Image (cartoon, helix red, strand yellow):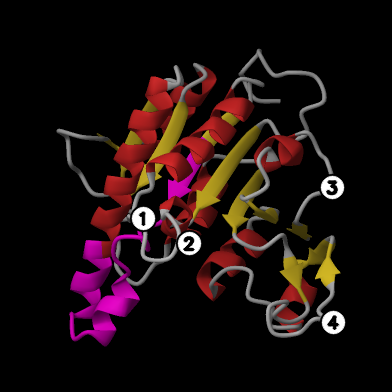
Amino acid sequence: MHANKRVALGVKYKRIILKLSGEVLRGGKGGDPIDAATLEKTCSQVKEIADLGVEVCVVIGGGNIFRGLQGSQRGVDRTTGDYMGMLATVINALALMDCLEKMGVTTRIQSAIPMNQIAEPFILRRAMRHLEKGRVVIFAAGTGNPYFSTDTTAALRASEMHADIIMKATKVDGIYDKDPKKFPDAVKYDQITFIDALKQRLNVMDSTAFSLCLDNNVSILVFDLNDEHAIRKAVLGEKIGTLVKN
């Protein structure tokens, strides 16, 4: 049991890593990289679970602004492109923090790349202390290293923080045996083991992130963020999305 004493009854997960792709902040096709209404909807879901006393860490991607891999396709050096992507995650983290604090949720950003004017450096014990005090912690700038995705960041931070689960918010309602957009007969899994997901080559996370979760026994819940109270349902243990576990 974690140190936070305010946890509401019926909460299944006490400390979570919420993994958001940068894309979830984007408006419709061709919309702004950070859409105000979408940002507000996302933050109100985070507030909902913080109010239940759940200790929330957020890892946000930067794909709505810049993706390192896309950069390398345009001739940008991969390492440089990855650093550009990490800086994009910091912009998203600042947007999340601003929105959450306006909702009355005390928030701290910890960056893997030192930028003292706008974020704390990532210090494990300090992050733990913030959680114990009921603050939301946003981990920005990935792992601080090129060639690692924000999925890997989520897996790494979940292992370090002893999180109960990684909640990976996506635009689909779980993991299917094949692409549900292309195949109408695709079957959704309620639960699957790491080994079965590997055998079937299901694209849950990139291989580095996935093996970190497997080695450190960190479960992953993949769910659709478009469902208005999805994160709340998930922390209360309702059947939602697909759970990947050992």
Amino acid residing under circle 1: Gly
Residue 88 falls in which quadrant of the image? bottom left
Amino acid residing under circle 2: Thr
Tell me the residue that label 3 is attached to: 239
Amino acid residing under circle 4: Asp
At 48% from the left edge and 61% from the top edge, which residue is drawn?
152
> Where is residue 183 drawn, in percent x and y?
76, 85
- Give the Cα distance between marks 2 and 1: 8 Å
- Give the Cα distance between marks 3 and 2: 25 Å
- Where residue 142 is drawn, which disc sits there? 1
In the displayed structure image, the side of residue 119 where residue 191 appears, left or right: right
- Residue 126 seen by the camera: no
Mark 3 vs mark 2: which is more N-terminal?
2
Do the residues under discs 2 and 1 have CB atoms within 8 angstroms? yes
* The one of 89 and 43 positioned closer to us in this rendering: 43
Q: Residue furthest top?
A: 5
Tell me the residue that label 4 is attached to: 185
Q: Which residues are magenta?
A: 57-84
